[in-house]
Amino acid sequence: MQCYRTLLRAATTAAASAAATATGAAVTASPSPVNNGAVPPLASGGHAVGAAAAIARSAAFYSLYRRLLKAGEEGAMMQHCLTVHSLDDSVKYGLRLLRLHRGLTTVDAASRQTRWFHLIKRTRQGLARRYYAWSLFYLRLKLRSWNAMADALVYVLFIVVCVLLYEIYHTCRIGVDRAEERYRTLAIPIVQTFDALEAAQQRKRALRREMEDDIVRSR
């Protein structure tokens, strides 16, 4: 009976604590008048957690980059090939490279310690070494191929943009030339009118001079 009472009291306490927790969470999630409908603290906490996770992934990537440099990878190759992908994919491929380097180093160390008359063991180690070396070569070739394709796409995009700009300039130039020709065609009657007026003025001046000369002669 006493045990039953103890269990009942514990269940009541747990239910009360769960209700208080739910009430506190609802109050925290609901926008209060002080916040004026701003982002709840839980949402801001989620953003902070996401930013902290992104910073942690970046730190892990830089640490992995340093370890790959120590393992013998080329820094230029990693900068050009790994940065083509997203951060998660770069970390994944970096971990694969590091795992293959460690396996190759382990096999080399074991083969140096293996004696020459252990033929089967040395054969297995040789096959394992060829496997790791081929996997490294294939992964590097894959990364370089993706990098080459990304560079080719960038160059193609640059060329396409240049061609589009030239076509736009060419089209605008054709429009301007046609507009100039049209304005010249429309301006022909106006020019002819001005030429006729100027010729009439010149004839009028010439006739006035002739009249003045005739008057002078008649006197």
Image (cartoon, helix red, strand yellow):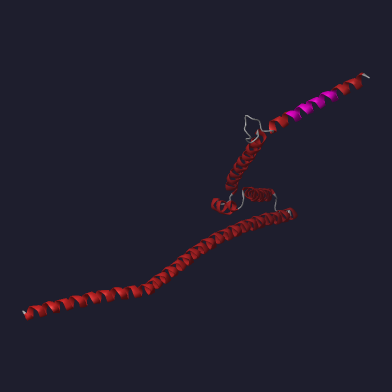
Nearer to us in this view, 144 or 219: 219
Nearer to us in this view, 188 or 128: 188
Query: Residue drawn at (21%, 78%), measured in percent from left and top?
Result: 203
Nearer to us in this view, 33 or 14: 33
- Image quadrant where residue 137 sits: bottom right
- Image quadrant where residue 15 sits: top right
**Residue 135 screen position, x and y as percent:** 67, 56
Identify the image quadrant of the N terminus: top right
- Image quadrant where residue 26 sits: top right
Which stretch appears magenta? 10-23
**Residue 13 screen position, x and y as percent:** 82, 23
Image position of 197 with respect to 142: above or below = below
The rendered magenta stretch, by its main secondary structure, is classed as helix
Identify the image quadrant of the C terminus: bottom left
Image position of 204 with respect to 141: above or below = below
Nearer to us in this view, 216 or 44: 216
43 is within the stretch colored magenta: no
> How many numbered markers are drawn?
0
Residue at far right of view: 1
**Residue 97 screen position, x and y as percent:** 64, 51
Q: Is residue 134 left or right of residue 217?
A: right
Q: Is residue 193 left or right of residue 95?
A: left
Image position of 37 with respect to 165: above or below = above
Residue at far left of view: 219
Query: Residue drawn at (16%, 76%), measured in percent from left and top?
Result: 208
Residue at far top of view: 2
Image position of 138 with respect to 177: above or below = above
16 is within the stretch colored magenta: yes
